[in-house]
Image: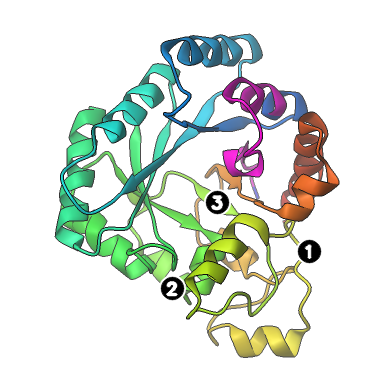
Amino acid sequence: MARRPLAMASGIMPDATPVALVECAASAGFDMGGMWADLADWTAQTTRAVRAALDATGLPLLDIEVVWIKPGPPDPDHDRILDIGLDLGAHNLLCVSSDPDEGATAAKLARLAERASGAIRINLEFGLFTEVKTMAQAAGIVQRIDHPAMALLIDALHWTRSEGSVAEVAALPPAWISYVQLCDAPMPGADHADPDAILAEAIDGRLPLGQGALPIDALLSALPADLPLGQGALPIDALLSALPADLPVAVEERSLALRDGWPELHARAAQLFRTSRAWLNGR
């Protein structure tokens, strides 16, 4: 398998400044970085400082997040995040939706896709903690928009918890997939009926690639029957096999254990790179 470009997702460092996200990803050896734009603190000077850090390190920016779509009219803050991403040369904008009206979600994403002017991909991520809960829902919205700037983002945790299948992934138009987010986790995971538990797992409960811990019997009983097993508790080997060999991988190991175990940011990034690259090199 080709050496997949590896990116550090911004979620592993909620305690980092935007410049530190760039510097830590670069120093650890990641091929690409991720950026979280907190508009409460983001200024024109922040953009200049991040751009300078990207230039100094030579680190490409895989994505910027997050546009969180909610009921009501289009949010001007979403335009601002998109414009920041364009200024920084980000390849992708990560979007999720809490709007139960799929038509309204599609319209707001279509507006962003038009604004992107082909310079950045607008990625819709699905997950049980949002109103776009499954890959099928997300695919329907992307198909409805029918714009070349639109993409569908697969997070291995959300894909598994929503009982997605490899067949669904393989059936997606290749042009819809710009990158993928990977992590590992225990099975069966958070109670699907408990939104707080689902969100807590996504933020604090992920594991390094290949380090899922449940026994095979429990794993088999929790997974759809058509999914082959990988080395971790998530079927991420199967997910990778359905995606292009050179597709960038963003490691989305949001983990309280990772943050507590490696509080120093450069050390945390280095640990994430070691475990992730070792796992990917073994594929």
**Camera-side mark, 2 or 3:** 3
Q: Is residue 249 magenta?
A: no
Q: Earlier in the sequence, mark 1 or mark 3?
A: 3
Mark 3, secondary structure of its residue: strand
Mark 2 or mark 3: which comes first in sequence? 2
Expressed as whole percent of the image width and height from the top left, the position of residue 10 reads 58, 38
Q: Secondary structure at mark 2?
A: helix
Residue 167 disc label? 2
Query: Callout 2: few (<14), some (14-19), or many (20+) C-alpha neighbours within 10 Å?
Result: few
Residue where numbered disc 3 is placed: 181
Identify the element where label 1 is drawn. Answer: loop
Q: Quadrant of residue 75?
A: top left
Please name whichever residue, 273 or 4, is drawn nearer the observer in this view of the structure. 273
Does residue 28 lie above or below 263 as drawn? above
Which residues are the magenta region? 2-24
Q: What residue would you read off at disc 1?
A: 211
- How far across and down, in percent of the image, does residue 270 sit? 80, 35
Q: Quadrant of residue 221?
A: bottom right
